[in-house]
Amino acid sequence: MTDETWGNIRGELLKSVGKNNYSNWIEPLEFSDLADGVATFLVPTQFMGNWVSRNFGEQILQELSNAGASVSRVEFSVPQRTIAAKPKPVSKPVASTFNEGRDLPGAPLDARFTFDSFVVGKPNELAHAAARRVAEGGPVTFNPLFLYGGVGLGKTHLMHSIAWELQRREQGLRIVYLSAEQFMYRFVQALRDKDMIAFKQLFRSVDVLMIDDVQFIAGKDATQEEFFHTFNALVDQGKQIIVSSDRAPTEITGIEDRIVSRLQSGLVVDLHPTNYELRLGILQQKIDQYSEQFPNLEIADGVLEFLAHRISTNVRVLEGAMMRLFAFGSLVGREVTLELAQDCLSDILRHSDRKITVEEIQRKVSDHYNIRLSDLIGPKRVRTFARPRQVAMYLAKTMTSRSLPEIGRRFGGRDHTTIMHGVRKIEELKQQDSQIADDLELLRRSLEA
Ligand code: ADP
Ligand code: MG
């Protein structure tokens, strides 16, 4: 049988299976050979092969016979290189064949988010090392890689870096990066268009799946369910999954237990809030990065230190401040002095006079005592939870400007008198119990850092 014959047969199949089925299932088939009555087609994934065989096998066979080919069976096989036992990436030709006419479902990658531009410091060194390891490709060692941390600490930057690096090492690797929100959007769209099979097939055929801000699917049951199945299917195939979130898996409420346990089954690493050295390092790196964009920029001594010291909320804000300052200095052709910085950034500086939140305190305290956040806030009265809870209440009262009823609300809707009692208790203990006094001192310092 010639390719031309197959071309004609495809035309017939288009009529009998309909346009949608045709573009999803028939078009991606690549005729390989016909020998001993067996016609073999290449398919990008096993899943797809099984599906086509079950649903369209008979029709394909029929059309082949109609066209005069002597065939008794059709087979679908995944090209050798894609079914290696080790999770070998799909090679280029297959990916491009499969990609014909339809794109991978991912979001674009930011060209600036690479390992080269990522500054490593104590707060992010573990996350960085894990990301580097995953970016080397090869056999999957931990699956998934779960990165979490507060906003603006570099989760997305690291994920994109991994994608760039993998892509560089192995062109044609099917890497899909998207936010959990986009995943949900695609899922809902597929449901609406009655196109679930294609959706499943698409997501199950990637080599590397990255889902950013996974906390978004909390409370969204159907999306969670679909995510769970996609996740399992890919893990079974030995494909790498990378997930990010603004909090640890166990702290995401409204997500099924089985998903939480899946998310924890690989390597979970967190990005800690930046420290002064890291912020300074990032600023210095950005200066190099933007030196072309802002020629003749002169920065007075102490300006970067000032910024690193004063803007400690998150790196995104720090970057924004720096850009504004450099643009200004470069435009007016003036040296960027401390005075100019204070003037030009007064709004940002006012905002980032650091405010400690009750939530932050709760998180720190539960970490410190090694108990779950839910137990810290929850109703259990055993000493192991009750004491840390009172410590957290005390810190919330003394380190934030929240009122007792407001704090009560953040402790699972407790009454303000309960909070008052907790605060008094700790004030008392602080005098008698040096362990408690040490704990308080340590927690206070780490919260103020
Ligand atoms: P997240 O996804 O955790 O909210 P992003 O990855 O979007 O944060 O980072 C916010 C901004 O800060 C980005 O512009 C990113 O390049 C920058 N950034 C964060 N951490 C670093 C770092 N360690 N080195 C260089 N830039 C960083
Ligand atoms: Mg992000």
Image (cartoon, grey):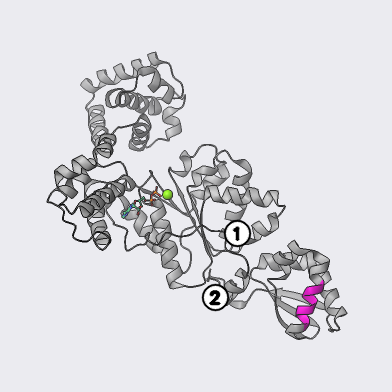
Q: Quadrant of the N terminus?
A: bottom right
Q: Position of residue 187 (x, y in %)?
A: 63, 50
Tally of numbered discs: 2
Front residue of 24/404: it is 24
Q: Would residue 175 appear left or right of 405 to someone viewing this image?
A: right
Q: Is residue 8 magenta?
A: yes
In the picture of the structure, the residue carrying the numbered disc 2 is: 92
Q: Residue furthest front?
A: 332
Q: Earlier in the sequence, mark 2 or mark 1?
A: 2
For image coordinates 83% across by 81% down, the residue present is: 71
Q: Position of residue 330 (x, y in %)?
A: 22, 55
The amino acid marked with disc number 1 is Phe
Front residue of 375/254: it is 254
Q: Secondary structure at mark 1?
A: helix
Numbered range of the magenta stretch: 5-12
Per the picture, the main secondary structure of the magenta-coloured stretch is: helix
Q: Would residue 53 appear left or right of 356 to someone viewing this image?
A: right
Q: Is residue 213 visible?
A: yes
In the picture of the structure, the residue carrying the numbered disc 1 is: 203
Packing grade of label 1 (10 A; few <14, some 14-19, many >=20) is: many
For image coordinates 24% across by 24% down, the residue present is: 433
